[in-house]
Amino acid sequence: MAFSKEDIKHIAGLARLRLTAQEEEDYTKEVASILNFVDQLQAVKTDNISPLYQVTEIENVLRPDGQPYPSDRVKTSALVDLAPDKDKNYVRVKAILSRK
Amino acid sequence: MELANLTIKRVQAGLSTGEFTATELQQELGDFARQKDKDLHAFLSFSDPEAQIREGSLANVPIAVKDNILIAGGKTTAASKILENYVAPYDATAISRLRVAGAWFQGKTNLDEFAMGASTENSAFGATRNPHDPTRVAGGSSGGSAAAVASGQAVAALGSDTGGSIRLPASFCGVVGLKPTYGRVSRHGLIAMASSFDQIGPITKTVEDAAILLAIIAGQDELDATSALQPIEDYEVRLREGVVGKRIGVPTEFFAEGLDPAVAKVVKKAITELEALGARVGEITLPHTKYAVPTYYILVPSEVSANVARYDGIKYGLSVQSENLLDTYLDSRAQGFGAEVRRRIILGTYVLSSGYFEAYYAKAQKVRRLIKEDFDKAFENFDVIVGPTAPTPAFKIGEKSDPVSMYLQDIYTAPASLAGIPAISIPCGQVEGLPVGLQIMGRQFDEATVLATAYAYEQR
């Protein structure tokens, strides 16, 4: 599958990456070469093989009812304190809707 | 005290006989590490000596920690500009367990940015140099931890392994590096790279020290739902069981094209030595080995692109306050992420995007099962599988500029990562003065047999 400069612009937008023209150029070449390398997987027959999502295949790890916060090892306030802009226990962001 | 040969066992003996005090050890080791680091750049930060009374099985034993593992109150940068000033708000579970055991955290070690790399050249703060030849890489991504242990700057260290990041630098620097089974050690407080692969593990001078550290950091944790309930064995006791009658499989594919013939010779000699110790050696086949690296480089960038979406200039880390919210995201990420991180974000976002998901991500997950099944079949008849850790000894700094050639460094380490099995790299000889690693892989949760095999070889 060909990977073009249009692809890189689209993907960079989705991934919230700002790229310079030179970076667009370089990444298009590099990613195309990596995709070319990984394309060898298409040769592997995988009919009737189910995907492996979790390698130890542990399922349904549940906490007991009634203990929404099983641990006091991580404090919410300590996490919010890391935000560059905050108000009490909230993280503040710039408005994304304007009045007019 | 002879710093270069200090092991956990030696430190414990020295402290208990009064040969040196904890304060003397911290001071002397700290001074030596700082001095040596001018040449090697294994560390990103050092702790000051602490005159504090510690008790426990690791009382006052200095441990160096890869800088993607959180130690509360200290900087944890993941060798990224985006976390340059990030101060960890809590301890990783592995750290809190070592803390309870009385360990002293000596400093934080260098890595490829967010552990993405095989050489430690991707660190935003400069590459680590190999103690055996400073013009060469230390391997990666836990290159700082491996170089620190190899140079005597550290007694023992923690690293993390996603596709070879403990084993490869251990091989390049001539030390012991153990990647535990996926889920054996809690990932809580390990900065996420690829969550279905990441594991914390020990990098040490001896197999015994690796067993000691694993016993402390292993075990189920309520803060990591993927951490496993499987019982933890007495690794130190099982170390001494030897290899007599153990069945060792040698995969043909690990000695095929791409392996440096000089490395092959050293590794084959090590295997004959294991045979001489009483092991039964047989040839096996892991037919999907050549698909491991391409599978890995679809799955890992996919997980990376999701995991590093959290660095947005809003919650924590570098924040460039721009005109509007979108520009804050774009500018923070543009200034914060290095080239390899961005490369993986682009690759991962692409292979997960509409129209490509089935062809890449879903396909790779199926091949991942085939790779795991190759190992399952082999372990029906064999107790461990051995081969080289890396295709070559340490390469020159700056030598590998093409991403794919760097990715191929993981050719022998990625299979165990995809299968979630434990694997250790131990020194088994040299090629032109550069260390070569022997890799020993075991069944899921059977670290004890892996360690016992490694110990038998080391003590031969």
Image (cartoon, coloured by chain):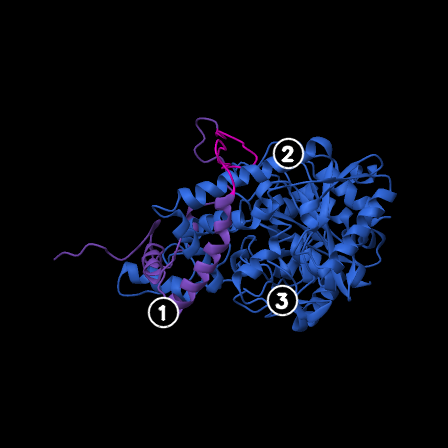
How far apart marks 2 and 3 lie (CA) works out to: 37 Å
The answer to whether any part of residue B195 appears in the image is no
Q: Which residue is mark 3?
A: B128
Of labels 1 and 3, the one closer to you: 1
Q: Of circles 2 and 3, which is in front? A: 2
Q: Mark 1 and mark 2: span between their CA atoms?
A: 47 Å
Of pointers 2 and 3, the one earlier in the residue sequence: 3
> For this rendering, which residue is in front, A85 or B293?
B293
Q: Nearer the viewer, residue B454 or B37?
A: B454
The residue segment tinted magenta is A44-63
State yes or no: residue B246 in magenta: no
In the figure, what tint was chain A given?
purple
Q: Which mark is residue A20?
A: 1
Which x, y percent locates residue B164?
A: 62, 52
Q: Chain of mark 3?
A: B
- Same chain for marks 1 and 3? no
Tell which subunit mark 2 falls on: B
Chain the render paints blue: B
Instruction: Inspect this view and state whether residue B199 appears.
Output: yes
The chain holding disc 1 is A
